[in-house]
Image (cartoon, rainbow, N blue to C red):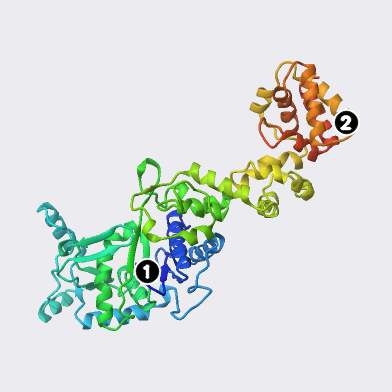
Amino acid sequence: MVSAPVRVRFCPSPTGNPHVGLVRTALFNWAFARHHKGTLVFRIEDTDAARDSEESYNQLLDAMRWLGFDWDEGPEVGGPHVPYRQSQRMDIYADVARRLQEAGHAYRCYCTTEELDARREAARAAGKPSGYDGKCRELSAEQIAAYEAEGRTPIVRFRMPDRPITFTDLVRGELTFTPENVSDYGILRANGAPLYTLVNPVDDALMEITHVLRGEDLLSSTPRQIALYAALAEIGVGNGTTPQFGHLPYVMGEGNKKLSKRDPQSSLNLYRERGFLPEGLLNYLSLLGWSLAEDRDIFTMDEMVAAFDIKDVNANPARFDLKKCEHINAEHLRRLDPKAFIEACGPWLKAPHAPWRPEAFDQAAFEAIAPHAQTRLTVLSDITANVDFLFLDEPVEDEASWNKAMKEGSDALLRTVRAKLAELADWNAEELKSAVLAAGEEHGLKLGKAQAPVRVAITGRTVGLPLFESLEVLGRERTLARVDAALAKLGG
C-alpha cells in the first residue's frame, strides 16, 4: 500500500475563500506525508483565468500557515519541480499535448457543442451511455480539411483504451470501470488552453507523486487519469509510476446534502473570525472519515500523525456537526497553557471594534480573570462578552437579564449586600462569597438566589464568569459603585 519514499500533493484552485472540505483534504495529505516521513507538495491549480485570483492565492497560503501545515515543495519553499503554479507551466502542458497527439494517444475533435448535446440526448433516449461517442477518433485528412474549411476550431481529446480499467482504491477497495462508461475526454480547449484533466496528471507524473488522496467527487476521473499516466510513461513523461489513489468520503451538511462552498458553515474564514484554534478545528475535521480510537475524540496533531493510516478512513459519508466542532474546540481551549490562552485572546481584546475604549483595557485585570474565562469559552471571540464588565464604564444593559434577576425585594437585598461588602477588610473571593451568603440568609435566600441580582448589577447579565472572583478583580470601589447604580435604577 505504501511505497517509499512517499510523495503526496495538495493542489487547490485559488477560487475564493478556502472551505472546510478542502482543509480536510489538506489535513489527510499532510498527516499521511508526515506519518510516512514523506514529502508534501503544495501545488496551485490556477489555469482557469476567469475564476482564479491573486487574492484567493494569497488566502490559500495564509490559510495553510494559520492551520499549521508545512509543505516540503511549493510556493515560498521552492523545490526540484518549480514552478508550482500551473499558470506558469503552460509550455510544459503544450509540449506534452503535442507529444500525446504525435504518439496517437490524443486527437483533434471538431464536434460542436450543439452536435454533442444532440448525440448525448439521443443516447440517453436509447438507454445508452451518453459520453463522447468517438466520432472524431479516426477522421481522414479530407474530413479534417472540410471541418477546418468550415472554420471549426477543434479541442483535443485523449483516446481511452478499449478495455476495462481496474485499480485498488486505498479507501474503497478494488474498483473497475468499463469502456462504455469512460469515454474519450478533452485535454485542451479550442483556444489551446489545457484542462484539469491534462495538467493534474502531467504534474503528478513530473513531480513523481506516489499517492493521490482526494475527494470522492473526483473518483469518476480516476480511470481516465490512470490511462493517461500509462500514455505519459510511454512518451517519457515522468518516471513511469502510476500513483495509488484514495478517495475521501463526502462531507455532508444540512438536509443530508453534500457540504458546498455556498453553505455558510463551510467557510474557513468563519472559524477564524469566531476564534477557533487551528488544532481544535483540525481535530474535528480529522473525525470526518477517520478516528484515532473509538473512545477518543480529543487529540493533538502530533498524535494524529503518529496514528494516521489511510486504510482506517471510512468510505461512508461524514456529517458535519457544528455543535461537536465547537465542543472539541472548547476542549482544546481548556488544554492551552495559561500564557498561551492569554496571548490567543489578545486579538479580540485589543481589536478596534472591542466594546470598550482602548485605554480602558487593563492587561493585569485580564490576566487575573483569564483562568476562570479559559474554562468557559467555546471560541476565542466569546472572551469579549465574558470580560467586558471589567473594562466598560457601565455594565452591559441586558433587559431580559435585569427583568429575570431583579424581583420584588431585590433592592432591599442589594442594600444589605452593599453594607456587608463595604465592611470587608479583605477583598478576596472567599470573603466576598461569605458576605453575599450572609446577606442572602438575612432575607431568607440561598446563595444562588442571593447572588443573581448582584451578578446583574455588576456584569449586566445573569450568566458569566464566577461571580466572586469577578468582584475581586473588579475591585471594591467599582463594585460598590455598580451596586449603587443598580439601587438607583430600582428606585432605592
Marks 1 and 2, the one that precedes in the sequence: 1
Residue 6, picture quadrant:
bottom left
Residue 231, picture quadrant:
bottom left
Residue annotated with mark 1:
2
> In the drawing, does residue 7 fall left or right of residue 273?
left
Residue annotated with mark 2:
424
Separation of marks 1 and 2 at Cα, in angstroms? 70 Å
Q: Decide which of 191, 402 is in the foreground and name it.
A: 402
> In the drawing, does residue 93 fall left or right of residue 186?
right
The image quadrant where one finds the N terminus is: bottom left
- Disc 1, disc 2: CB below 8 Å? no
Q: Amino acid at mark 2?
A: Leu
Badge 1 local density, few (<14 within 10 Å), some, or many (20+)? few
Q: Position of residue 330 (x, y in %)?
A: 58, 45
> In the drawing, does residue 306 fall left or right of residue 366?
left
Label annotation for residue 268 = none
What kind of element bears circle 1? loop
The image quadrant where one finds the C terminus is: top right
Q: Is residue 243 above or below residue 421?
A: below
Q: Amino acid at mark 1?
A: Val
Q: Is residue 440 above or below residue 145?
A: above
What kind of element bears circle 2? loop
Q: Closer to the observer: label 1 or label 2?
A: 1
Q: Position of residue 191 (x, y in %)?
A: 30, 73
Q: Decide which of 212, 130 is in the foreground and name it.
A: 212
**Residue 23 visible in the picture:** yes
Q: Position of residue 147 (x, y in %)?
A: 15, 74
> In the drawing, does residue 10 fall left or right of residue 173?
right
Q: Decide which of 357, 292 is in the foreground and name it.
A: 292
